[in-house]
Amino acid sequence: MDAHPASDSAGAAAEVLSPTRCTVYRRTATAAGVPADLQLHIFEPSGHCAADRRAAIVFFFGGGWNRGTPTQFYPHCRHLADRGMVAMAADYRVAERHGTSPRESVSDGFSALRWISDHAGELGVDPARIAAGGGSAGGQVAAATATLAGDGDGSPARPAALVLFNPVFDNGPGGYAHARVAAYWRDFSPLHNIAPGIPPSIVLLGTADALVPVSAAEAWRDRVRALGGRCELRLYDGQPHGFYNAKNPEMFRLTTAEMDAFLASLGFTAG
């Protein structure tokens, strides 16, 4: 189950967009020891300044922890910045570029959340309203920041909400990429680490997804709700993996509308 589409990106639509700025959130290295600075690609609302205290979100791209770039979520970031949020797309370590494992990908997710929280004042961000989002394996990274113990590098900063597009929830036996994470799956699989206090989440998934079964999303929803949490599951009939990207304008419009409504319900946007 470790297969992945050749591209889970937003395609050409992302290439015409540019972030307001980029900043390094983590100085690290490849498996070969080559320095690798990881950046946040930041989209700010018009007129934004450091004195503001806006809600924020950071997105993690998909690609099976093997490949991918932050440009996948440029359209989502621009969309939310136009609605008043500070929206960011994070780079993180992946196998093809850095020679790393899924564990390093998740560690970088924690580092990104921690950096944003620590620098909320200069970013013009409300530290109590920082959400995490992502697609596919990037959805796993986002969900991990809300469920796993952390990366051992200080106390983890937890997201206040989750926006998850066909996310990888289940890394247990029979789940996605279990063979790659078998040695540490119990401390890695978001579905198996849900605990009281988990933030509200929205999950957007196609019923024809060949990599993320509907049953995994339903299990996430049911476990969250059993603990008194909130999860909104939106299923899209006949849609495959990656259906929500901007290269599919109709599905992009429908899924971003659901994302907007969810974030507005939390007071992150005005709707």
Image (cartoon, helix red, strand yellow):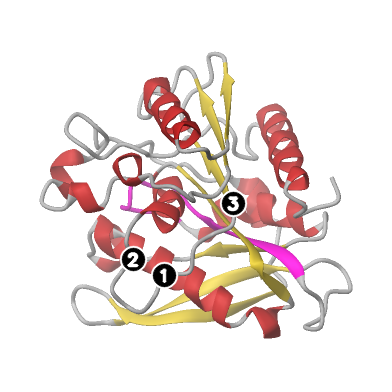
Q: Residue at horizontal 38%, vertical 36%?
A: 5
Find the residue positioned furthest to the right: 47
Please indicate whether residue 256 sits to the left or right of residue 151 in the image.
right
Disc 3 to disc 2, C-alpha distance: 17 Å
Residue 63: percent from left, percent from top = 39, 47
Give the mark, 1 or 3, whose residue is nearer the N terminus: 1
Residue position for label 3: 161
Q: Amino acid at mark 1?
A: Pro
Whether residues under marks 1 and 2 lie with C-beta atoms below 8 angstroms apart, the answer is yes
Q: Which residues are magenta?
A: 54-68
Give the mark, 3 or 2, whose residue is nearer the N terminus: 2
Residue position for label 2: 150
Number of residues whose C-alpha sits closer than 10 Å to that of mark 3, classed few (under 14), some (14–19) or many (20 or more): many
* The stretch drawn in magenta includes residue 89: no
Give the mark, 1 or 2, whose residue is nearer the N terminus: 2
Residue position for label 1: 156
